[in-house]
Image (spheres, rainbow, N blue to C red):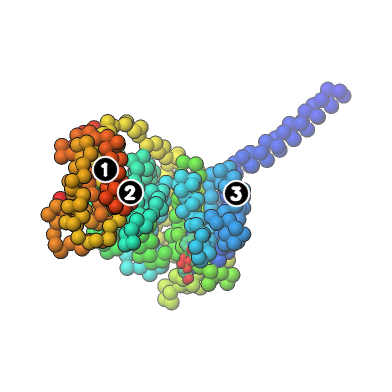
Amino acid sequence: MFKKNICDSNAIIINMFTTFVKKRMTQIAKTPITVAYGDGIGPEIMDATLRILLAAGAKIEPEIIEIGENVYNNGFSSGIKPEAWESLRRTKVFLKAPITTPQGGGFKSLNVTIRKVLGMYANVRPCISYHPYVKTKHPVMDVVIIRENEEDLYAGIEHQQTDEVIQCLKILSVPGTEKIVRYAFEYARAYGRKKVTCFTKDNIMKMTDGMFHKVFDKIGEEYPEIEKEHWIIDIGAAKLADTPEVFDVIVMPNLYGDILSDVAAQITGSVGLAGSANIGDHVSMFEAIHGSAPRRAGQNVANPSGLLLGAVQMLMHIGQPDVAEKVHNAWLKTMEDGIHTYDIFKEGTSKQKVGTKEFADAVINNIGNVPAQLKKVDYSTTSNKPFVIKPSVTIPAKKELVGVDIFLHHKDRDPNKLGNSLKDIKAGNMELTMITNRGVKVFPDGMAETFCTDHWRCRYKSEELSASTYADVISLQQQITNLGFDIIKTENLVTMDGQAMFSAGQGQ
Ligand code: NAD
């Protein structure tokens, strides 16, 4: 009897334990994600997206945070409350609906803040046309734009320096460039893409964009199976707008990528269909590329496709490619069935104009189906492993100060008068070698036709690039100030391992 009792209680305990483990396993198997419903059409498209994901069996556990207009208006100038950061740090995955940035000064872009503060270095935007179901001039377009997301002119370092001249600093780092370039190659490898193209303007910006191009060439050598090419951005952009079918994956610095990813999404037929991933080492964010469309809010008309395709990228990121494939194919089938929201509805091509909710219902009904005409997606062989993106270790070079560019605010537009006032100033082995205005050499021997503003760069250095001291730089500044000139800033001229690390003046 006693024995039996022990057995019974054991069985009960084992049963309880099994139920507990099963429950725990389901809990463990669910990936927590931070979700923001956003503003305008945000809540409607997020609701539609989450319904589709859950119907397809996504193992996710949404944790809701508030961001956007309300938060801005409650005194948080970045549009996000401190406790929301904790959720992002905990889940490391953010599915975000668009938000409305209030008009007027003082409000910072939440998107830029989140991307940069949390180190989301790669922005990934697949731009695909869905011909003949969505009208486009480019029926065979399938391009992925991979944009550097943290650096470049988006460092946001701007200064008004004179009455007439304002400066914005373009900052590219070697590790930042290595990370985005390697990400592009890893992405191409994981998704079976054949070619990676790099866009830069290194014929003009030989040091910044030149470094990006060099890093692309160097890292590209590690991916022999992938075709590589480089285009100067202007002709590359023209080619992308005209013949997008020649491109596959394109990697580029931040500003070019910002502009060209919108162009690429638009020429597929609608900017409203593209999703976007912002990938970081710590936290990654997934969203639509369009905004909150406040005029369409609350009417059940918005197209949830952009956010849904962003969510498909999220499912891949959190290791649920089977669900990603199901959702993506169901969506493609719905597009093919001609069940369209107003923004892509076309008499003749579309069959049924539906609202946000009905579109989501149609996608849910198609779960398990695949498109017949459009190319179905197959993520079964896509690598599930997170990409290992580590920049190389920087080996410090031997750095030597060899001169200084001293920038002046000076109203008189005559370069010869200015040059003659400054040419006798010397310190150590440094003497005035040239003056430029907006980068063009105007002294000595400038051209009479060159227009000059009130912003002058005076370059002091030794002819042979021999070492100078910072005390000499200070002495130059002191002498120039003593003559009554207004110094805006200085920029050191250095050599690294004996090579000059500064650009020449145009016309020099
Ligand atoms: P928008 O993309 O919100 O809308 C432009 C137009 O495109 C809309 O009027 C609408 O006709 C159409 N549209 C956009 N998305 C649609 C959808 N899913 N379904 C159907 N039609 C759609 O651009 P906007 O009007 O310039 O910006 C509105 C607000 O969104 C601004 O406050 C802006 O700052 C913000 N914004 C946010 C994000 C973001 O959170 N990621 C991105 C861009 C703009």
Locate residue 92: give its quadrant.
top right
Locate residue 220: give its quadrant.
top left
Mark 3 = which residue? 82
Element under disc 2: strand
Q: In this view, does 349 lie above or below 321?
A: below
Q: Dot 3 surroundings within 10 Å: few (below 14), some, or many (20 or more)?
A: few
Mark 2 = which residue? 489
Nearer mark to the viewer, of 2 and 3: 2
Amino acid identity at mark 2: Lys
Amino acid identity at mark 1: Leu
> In percent of the image, x 59 and y 70: which residue is there?
298
Q: Dot 2 surroundings within 10 Å: few (below 14), some, or many (20 or more)?
A: few
Q: In the image, is 408 to the left or to the right of 85?
A: left
Q: Give the alpha-carbon distance from disc 2 to disc 3, as whole Å.
A: 37 Å
> In percent of the image, x 13 and y 59: which residue is there?
447
> In percent of the image, x 18 and y 62: which residue is there?
450
Q: Dot 1 surroundings within 10 Å: few (below 14), some, or many (20 or more)?
A: many
Quarter of the figure with the N terminus: top right
Relative image position of residue 280 (x, y in whole percent): 46, 44
Amino acid identity at mark 3: Pro
Asked whether residue 142 appears in the rendered view, the answer is no
Relative image position of residue 306 (x, y in whole percent): 47, 60
Q: Is residue 345 above or below residue 139?
A: below
